[in-house]
Amino acid sequence: MSDGPGQGLTDEELSFLQSMLDLARAGDPLLLEHVDAGLPVDLTNSSGDTLLLLAAYHVHVDLVAGLLERGADHSRVNDRGQTALGAAVFRRRADVVTRLLGAGADPTLGRQSGYAVAEVFELPEMTALLRGEGA
């Protein structure tokens, strides 16, 4: 879905891929079964949102962990300069931030990086967590 509308896919295939993005938003563990069966772990929508970014933004800790375990790229930046880590900081979720940092996510990556989000929204507890100063 990242190379433009259609890509030669049928309406049924596009609908299926959209449903996978919806599973990420909903935090449905069925998504991990699809990834295990061959769905690209870094499936991306037309805005550059990955499954991981959607799961992080919608605060699905277990799904974030499962996607990371399956090799999801935490360094992907969407079309708005957002990352999964920035989304987790925005949502003020230390548990998701900690998972992403533990996987190696860079708090300086993207226009709306973890640090930038923490600064703009005045979240000192998130800044401290990004610096490794708290849990």
Image (spheres, grey):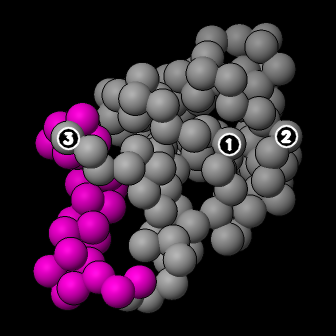
Q: Nearer the viewer, mark 1 or mark 2?
A: 1
Q: Find numbered disc 2 in the image and state the secondary structure of the residue it sits on.
A: loop
Q: Give the x, y percent position of residue 24.
A: 32, 51
Question: Is residue 22 covered in magenta?
Answer: yes
- The residue wearing badge 3 is 37
Which mark is in front, 1 or 3?
Answer: 3
Relative image position of residue 69 (x, y in whole percent): 42, 23
Q: Amino acid at mark 1?
A: Ser
Q: Mark 2, mark 3: which one is toward the viewer?
A: 3
Ranked by sequence position, the earlier of labels 1 and 2 is 1
Quarter of the image where the N terminus is located = bottom left
The alpha-carbon separation of the residues under discs 1 and 3 comes to 23 Å
Q: Amino acid at mark 2?
A: Thr
Checking the image for residue 75, the label placed there is 1
Q: Which residues are magenta?
A: 7-36
As drawn, the label of residue 108 is: 2
